[in-house]
Image (cartoon, grey):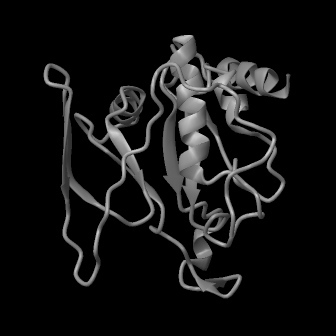
Amino acid sequence: ESLKNILSEHEAANPPSKNKTLFTVNHPFWYHYDIDPMFLAENPEVRFFEIANAISPPTFGMVEGAWSPDRFWDIALAHRAARGAPLLYAVATDDTHDYSRLYREFEGVKNPIRKCHVRVRAKELSVDALVDAMNAGDFYASNGLEFDDIRFDRSSATLHVDVKPQSGKRIVIRFYGTKKGFDAAIGAGRQYRL
């Protein structure tokens, strides 16, 4: 019920005629685990959630028994697809609330600026163009990896990924997915182990 209240407050403060905005569920992997994958599956009006954040779990570790971020997202996506709900997109942020600490340390770790970010392919550098591109899914979230290009050809159902080389790093891309007719039970136990 609190999500509905927050969404209605967001929509009242940001009518479409006023500004284009994004509504994001942040910190789903925080220590308190306020939400689970089914929360996002059952609330299709939420289109974005934070999969990575430079100063919170899994960066600083996760509670034993938590869902891994990829498993969490896959469960939510599979259940949304089965219901005909719109896609759920993942975003990443540096979560810096105070840029005056740009060169100071946070909990013994150098300031995490730029460790988690979103790359958007937009027509121009404006709020409207960025929001439109993100709503269309023309972006990716990253905690460091950069792509030169990502293209999907609908006619051939082919995904083409060009990764920007990084010296001294081996890059492995894994694709996760759930087939139609999957077992919808997610179980009481959680999947992630430290």
Is residue 22 visible in the rendered image? The answer is no
Pick whichever, 108 or 20, lies toward us: 108
What is the total number of numbered labels drawn onto the structure image? 0
Q: Residue at image x 81%, y 40%? A: 188
Name which residue lies at 67% across and 58% down. Answer: 192
Task: Tell me which corner region of the image, top left, top right, bottom left or bottom right, holds residue 151.
Answer: top left
Q: Is residue 38 above or below residue 173?
A: above
Up-down: is 152 above or below 166?
above
**Depth order, front residue of 114/176:** 176
Residue 173 visible, this orientation: yes
**Residue at (44, 37) in percent of width and height:** 177
Residue 36 drawn at (x, y percent) = 74, 39
User: 140 left or right of 44?
Assistant: left
Query: Horizontal and vertical percent for residue 113?
Result: 50, 70
Horizontal side of 175 relative to 157 (left or right) equals right
Q: Which of the pair 193/26 is nearer the observer?
A: 193
Residue at coordinates 40% horizontally, 33% vertically from top-left?
134
The N terminus - image quarter: top right
Residue 60 on image: x %, y %: 67, 73
- In the rendering, at what x and y percent does residue 30 appear? 74, 56
Locate the C terminus and report the quarter of the image it occupies. bottom right
Left/right placement of residue 64 relative to residue 68 reads right
Whether residue 161 is situated above or below residue 152 in the rendered picture: below
